[in-house]
Image (tube, rainbow, N blue to C red):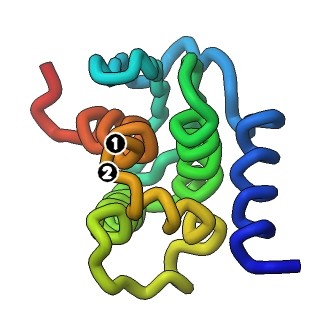
Amino acid sequence: MHLDDLYRQVIMDHYQHPRNQGELPDGIRVDLKNPSCGDEISLRLKVENGVVSDVRFEGTGCSISMASASMMTEAIKGQPVETALQLNRLFRAMMKGEDVDTDALGDLEALHGVSKFPARIKCATLAWQALEKGVQPNRE
């Protein structure tokens, strides 16, 4: 099996069977929309003692945006906020085509090919933007 085919399978699995989808009633809520394509995400975070103790999302959109949200929630759940933000920086750098340590990204590397399609980068980074906004100390 070709590596690109494996990556497509990982993305489609997360799109068809999203992880950590649903409500989180007592957490931080961030709602974002990508106006260029209509993708929407509602990210819910529970941060306790500097750790993302729980994270969930709901949304509508393309396979890239929903798979990215699912993969992100798996990667950051149970991680210190600083680790989640470091993953955010690595992921965004990868989307910009920068050379990054893909081993640190784990399954998120499957989204690497999106960086070749500038119009889809916003789809892949929507959930990550919500994460960054959600953990800012002075949220509005």
Q: Nearer the viewer, residue 139 or 50?
A: 139
Q: Nearer the viewer, residue 81 or 58?
A: 58
Q: Is residue 121 left or right of residue 41?
A: left
Q: Residue at x 48, y 33 (%)?
A: 46
Q: Secondary structure at mark 1?
A: helix
Residue in the picture at 43% in, 87% down: 101
Residue assigned mark 1: 119
Mark 2: which amino acid?
A: Pro
**Is 43 drawn above or below residue 89 in the view shown?**
above
Residue beneath label 2, please?
118
Judged from this view, the residue extending furthest toward the right is 1
**Real-space CA distance between mark 1 and mark 2, rounded to the nearest whole angstrom:** 4 Å
> Where residue 123 appears, x then y in whole percent?
42, 38
Eyeballing the image, is 52 above or below 109?
A: above
Name the image quarter holding the C terminus.
top left
Residue 2: image tag:
none
SS for dot 2: helix
User: Dot 1 surroundings within 10 Å: few (below 14), some, or many (20 or more)?
Assistant: few
